[in-house]
C-alpha cells in the first residue's frame, strides 16, 4: 500500500505543477465517476481544465492530444494499455486496465515492430497509478475511480467527499461480484467513506433495484443470482410473493426498502429453499446475500441512494453518448441534468424491453454449442450485450452461451457474447474466444470470461459462428 500511495503522491505533485489540463476518461459508470473525481479535484485547485469522454482511446485521439499540447493530460479509467503511444505527451494515468508494459499480448499494431514497441515504451515517462503495476488484481482490487480518488485525496484532503463516487465506480465495474463484497484497496476507500459518514454498507439482498423497483419486478429481473422459475416471469414473481402473504402494494408498489425485516427474511429463506430444491446448488444460493452500499447523503428511494443503481444511471447516459449528463449528476446537479439522466434511464429501460421483445419475435437460433440472434439495425450496438444477458436468463435459454450480432455505426458488425456462470466454472472463457475468433475473420475483440464482445466485418457472421462454436466445444472438453 505504501508504494501505491507514494505513486499517488508523485502524480499529485505533477498535477499541481500544471496549469492547463485535459482530463480524458471512459464513457461507462467507472469512467464517468473517475472523470468527475478528477474534475472536482482540479476545480478545487482552480486549474484551467476541460474533460473529454471517449468510448475507446485510440492512436488518433492521442495524436490529437499531442497537437493540442496542454501542460498535462490526465487519463482516468483508461490509458494504461496505450502508454507505448504516449511518447511526447505530458500525461499521468489513473487506471486499472492491464498496462501495455505488462501485457503479454503486444497490441496488434505494435507486433510488426517489437523492438520499436519496447523502445517507445521505455522512452515514455508517463506516471501511472495502476494496481497491475503493484501486483494487484485490477479486476477486483480497485477501479479507475478508486485510483483517481487516491490521487485526488493527495491533492486536497477535502476530496474525501468524493469517496462515494469511488465506490460507485467500483460497483459499476462489478468489482464486488466475485467476493460478494469490496475487497483490497477498495475496502480501504470504503472504510474512509464510512468513517466520514458518506457511505454505509451492510449485508442484504444483492438484487438490482432495492431502492426503486417494486419487489416483484426486482425478482423478475434478477440475473445474479438467477432465480429458478422466477427470473423473467412476472406472473410467477407476483404469485410467489402472494403465497408468502407479502402485500405487493400499500399506497404504492412496495420496494425492497419498504419491507419489514421479517418479510425480507421470509423471502430470502424461501428463495434459498427454491434454489436448492431446483438443484442450482449452494454456490448459487450464496449469491443472494452480499454487501450493499448506500450513499447516505442521497435521498432514499432514488437511484442515487444505492451504488448499484447509481452506476446503472450513469451507464444509461454513457451508453448513448451522453456521459456529460452523468458527469453533471456526479458533480452534484440534482436539477436539469439529473432530470435528463432519469429520462435516459427510462429510455434505456424501454430500449431493453423493446430489444428483448424484438429478439423474441425473430427467435433465437440454437446450435449444438451455442445460441445466437442477429438484431441488424433493430438494437443499438451499445446495448445488444445487455439484451443478450437478459435473453440468457429466460427459461429454456440458460444452457448455452449466447452470441448476439448488431449492425455497428462504423459499418462493421458488433458482437456481444454472454455465458451461463456454470459453463464458465467448467472452463469456458469468452474473452479468449472473442479475441481469437474475431482476429481470424479480420476483426478484434476481448472482455471477460463471462461477458465479452467483438467487432467483425459485415458478412463474416456465419464463418465467425463456426469458429466460435468450435472453440467453445474445445474449451468445454
Ligand atoms: O453493462 P452491463 O450489462 O453491466 O449493464 C447492466 C445493465 O442492465 C444496466 O444498465 C441496467 O439498466 C440493466 N439491468 C437492469 N436490471 C437488472 C440488471 C441489469 O435493468 N436486474
Ligand atoms: O459490448 P459488450 O457489453 O458486449 O462488451 C462486453 C465486454 O467485451 C466489455 O468488457 C467490452 O469492453 C469487451 N469488448 C471488447 N472488444 C470489443 C467489444 C467488447 O473487448 N470489440
Ligand atoms: O466494458 P466491459 O468490461 O465494461 O463490460 C462488462 C460487461 O460485462 C457489462 O455489460 C456487464 O454487465 C457484463 N458482465 C456480466 N457478468 C459479469 C461481469 C460483467 O454480464 N459477471
Ligand atoms: Zn473501469
Image: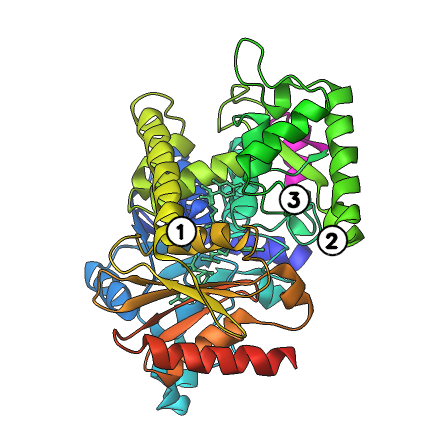
Residue 420 lies in magenta, yes or no? Answer: no
Residue found at the far top of this picture: 251
Q: Secondary structure at mark 3?
A: loop
Q: Secondary structure at mark 1?
A: helix
Q: On the rendered image, what quadrant is the N terminus found in?
A: bottom right
Question: Are dots 1 and 3 in contact, CB under 8 Å?
Answer: no
Mark 1 vs 3, N-terminal side: 3
Task: Give coordinates of residue 154: x percent, y percent.
Answer: 54, 44
Q: Is residue 237 above or below residue 101?
A: above
Residue 222 or residue 372, whichever sits in front: 372
Find residue 117 and report its image quarter: bottom left
Residue 209 or residue 271, whichever sits in front: 271
Residue 303 or residue 406, whichever sits in front: 406
The span shown in magenta is 190-203
In three-dimensional space, the C-alpha distance between marks 2 and 3, rounded to whole angstroms, equals 9 Å
Residue 195 lies in magenta, yes or no? Answer: yes
Residue at 57% x, 72% y is: 429
Circle 1 is placed at which residue position? 360
In three-dimensional space, the C-alpha distance between marks 1 and 2, rounded to whole angstroms, equals 26 Å
Residue 178 badge: none
- For label 1, the crowd category at 10 Å Cα-Cα, with few meaning under 14, some 14 to 19 and many 20 or more, is few
Mark 2 vs 3, N-terminal side: 3
Question: Are dots 1 and 2 in contact, CB under 8 Å?
Answer: no
Mark 1 vs 2, N-terminal side: 2
- For label 3, the crowd category at 10 Å Cα-Cα, with few meaning under 14, some 14 to 19 and many 20 or more, is many
Task: Give coordinates of residue 473: x percent, y percent.
Answer: 57, 80
Q: In front of the other: label 1 or label 3?
A: 1
Residue at 39% x, 41% y is: 353
Circle 2 is placed at which residue position? 280
Amino acid at each position: 500500500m505504501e508504494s501505491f500511495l507514494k505513486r499517488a503522491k508523485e502524480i499529485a505533485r505533477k498535477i499541481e505543477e500544471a496549469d492547463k489540463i485535459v482530463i480524458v476518461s471512459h464513457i461507462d459508470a467507472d469512467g464517468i465517476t473517475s472523470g468527475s473525481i478528477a474534475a472536482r479535484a482540479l476545480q478545487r485547485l482552480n486549474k484551467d481544465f476541460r474533460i473529454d469522454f471517449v468510448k475507446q482511446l485510440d492512436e488518433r485521439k492521442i495524436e490529437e492530444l499531442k497537437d493540442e499540447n496542454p501542460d498535462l493530460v490526465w487519463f482516468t479509467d483508461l490509458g494504461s494499455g496505450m502508454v507505448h503511444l504516449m511518447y511526447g505527451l505530458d500525461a499521468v494515468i489513473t487506471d486499472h486496465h492491464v498496462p501495455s508494459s505488462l501485457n503479454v499480448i503486444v497490441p496488434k499494431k505494435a507486433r510488426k515492430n517489437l523492438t520499436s514497441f519496447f523502445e517507445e515504451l521505455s522512452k515514455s515517462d508517463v506516471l501511472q497509478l495502476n494496481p497491475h503495476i503493484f501486483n494487484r488484481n485490477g479486476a477486483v482490487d480497485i477501479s479507475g475511480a478508486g485510483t483517481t480518488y487516491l490521487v485526488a485525496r493527495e491533492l486536497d484532503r477535502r476530496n474525501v467527499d468524493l469517496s462515494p463516487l469511488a465506490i460507485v465506480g467500483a460497483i459499476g465495474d462489478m468489482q464486488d461480484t466475485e467476493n460478494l463484497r469490496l475487497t483490497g484497496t477498495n475496502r480501504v476507500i470504503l472504510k474512509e467513506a464510512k468513517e466520514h459518514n458518506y457511505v454505509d454498507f451492510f449485508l442484504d439482498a444483492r438484487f438490482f433495484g432495492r431502492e426503486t423497483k417494486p419487489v416483484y419486478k426486482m425478482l423478475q429481473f434478477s440475473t445474479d443470482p438467477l432465480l429458478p422459475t422466477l427470473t423473467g416471469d412476472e406472473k410467477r414473481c407476483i404469485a410467489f410473493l402472494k403465497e408468502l402473504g407479502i402485500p405487493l402494494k400499500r399506497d404504492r408498489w412496495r420496494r425492497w426498502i419498504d419491507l419489514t425485516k421479517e418479510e425480507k427474511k421470509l423471502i430470502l429463506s424461501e428463495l434459498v429453499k427454491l434454489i436448492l430444491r431446483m438443484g442450482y446448488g449452494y454456490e448459487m444460493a450464496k449469491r443472494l446475500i452480499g454487501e450493499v452500499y448506500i450513499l447516505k447523503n442521497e435521498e432514499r428511494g432514488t437511484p442515487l441512494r444505492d451504488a448499484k443503481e447509481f452506476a446503472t444511471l450513469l451507464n444509461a447516459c454513457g451508453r448513448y453518448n451522453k456521459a456529460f449528463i452523468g458527469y453533471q449528476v456526479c458533480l452534484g446537479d440534482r436539477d436539469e441534468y439529473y432530470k435528463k439522466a432519469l429520462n435516459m434511464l427510462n429510455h434505456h429501460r424501454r430500449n431493453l424491453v423493446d430489444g428483448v421483445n424484438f429478439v423474441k419475435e425473430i427467435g433465437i437460433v440454437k446450435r449444438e454449442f451455442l445460441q445466437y440472434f442477429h438484431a441488424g439495425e433493430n438494437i443499438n450496438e451499445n446495448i445488444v450485450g445487455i439484451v443478450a444477458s437478459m435473453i440468457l436468463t429466460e427459461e429454456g435459454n440458460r444452457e448455452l452461451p449466447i452470441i448476439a450480432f448488431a449492425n455497428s455505426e462504423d459499418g462493421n458488425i458488433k458482437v456481444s457474447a454472454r455465458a451461463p456462470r456454470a459453463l464458465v466454472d467448467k472452463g469456458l472463457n469468452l474473452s479468449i474466444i472473442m479475441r481469437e475468433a474475431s482476429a481470424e475473420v479480420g476483426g478484434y475483440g476481448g472482455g471477460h470470461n463471462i461477458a465479452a464482445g467483438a467487432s467483425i466485418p459485415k458478412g463474416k457472421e456465419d464463418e465467425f459462428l463456426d469458429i466460435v462454436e468450435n472453440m467453445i466445444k474445445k474449451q468445454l472438453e
